Image: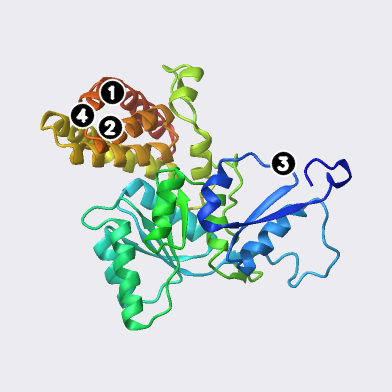
Amino acid sequence: LLSDPMLQSVKILRLVPLSKRAEVDQDIPPVHMHYVTKPLRFYALRQTLINALDDQPLAMQPTHSPAVAPTLSGHILLGEDNPVNQEIALLMLQSMGCTVTMAQNGHEVVDHAKQSRYDVILMDCQMPEMDGFEATRTIREWERYESRPPIPIIALTAHATAGDRERCLAVGMSDYLSKPFSMAQLSAVLNSWLPLKPMTENQESPASPQPGFLTHRPTAPPSTSESDTSFIVDQNAWKSITSLQRPGKPDVLAKILSLYLADSHDLVATLRQGMASLDAQVVGQAAHSLRSRSAMLGAISLSKLCRQVEDFSRQGQLTEAESLLAPLTEAFEHASRIFQAELERRPA
């Protein structure tokens, strides 16, 4: 099909098993190739068809008035211990029209799931006390014992390998989303599990997930060259955050930068202490937490260094991890100065 010039304008929709999605995500498909995961769900198939046919509109009458836009509807249980990631996910979900209940660790997720009915659980895999894998196993066992229908559980994973994603599915998770994620990526996953609802004419429209919309445009500190700033911080991540800004509401980027600066220095100190005491678990947990929040704010080089330290700590190779401590600290201090300068420039 791909080699036939007569079929170059024909849209191809692949049906991909969920367990194989990680492999497909790594491919660069032809422009006329699209895919949807199995088992098929109405809203996911509908959205994929819309995307595939966006240059060939269907000649049909809209179900709703063009002035009435669809939005998501659902009660989401968010299991996430990182305050920066919490705030960003919360803003995204609320902008889509969802209500959200927060949980700080796996035990809290399990307790909430047993006490109330949720439409979807967003489950961070690396929470303290009880991680997302164990929490999912516990929920699935409880559902079977109580003869309850399974709640869709979407893994929030900082790892992008097929093996990590398959592990998520093996413990009973329904889907996965790699961090850092955009609002569009979160919406696409939720569209597979939540119904759309029409907005009323008087309802406030959700914030646009399209990149590039800025309420307050971030500015680089004068002491840092533009090339250095773009190397350390990808400001497209800031744009996706400021796109969630609502008129008359507190500055969302300022709040998230403040959350980052509030305790990230403590994470670096904890990482150093773990190195000194040869505690690979402490080193890995601190590096993971710092990596996740740094990636969400676009600190790319810092996030990569944290990933390397985390990987070494998993393998018990603390000598190799310690060799990265100096460049990691330098990248952290540089990113923190940029964040602090931006925070001071924003309207109070």
Q: Where is 267 relative to 93, above or below?
A: above
In the image, farthest residue toward the right = 6
Marks 2 and 4: in contact by CB < 8 Å? yes
Marks 3/2 in contact by CB < 8 Å: the verdict is no
Find disc 4 in the rendering and name its residue.
318
Left or right of residue 183: residue 329: left
Marks 1 and 3 in Cβ contact (< 8 Å): no
**Label 3, label 2: how far apart the Cα atoms are:** 37 Å
Query: Dot 1, crowdedness within 10 Å: few (<14), some or many (≥20)?
Result: some
- The residue at which mark 3 appears reads as 30
Drawn side of residue 78 relative to residue 15, left or right: left
Asked if one can make out residue 23 in the rendered structure from this viewpoint, the answer is yes
**Residue 312 marker:** 2
Of helix, strand and loop, which one carries label 1?
loop
The amino acid on which the numbered mark 4 sits, given as a three-letter code, is Leu
Earlier-in-chain disc, 4 versus 1: 4
Q: What's the distance in space between the residues labelled 4 and 1, CA to CA?
A: 10 Å
Decide which of tag 3 and tag 2 comes sooner along the chain. 3
Q: What's the residue at 44%, 51% (across, down)? A: 165
Image quarter hosting the C terminus = top left
Classify residue 108 as left or right of residue 171.
Answer: left
Mark 2 vs mark 1, CA separation in Å: 10 Å
Identify the residue under disc 1: 324
Instruction: Report helix, strand or loop for mark 3.
Output: loop
Q: Where is residue 93? Give x, y as percent.
A: 48, 59
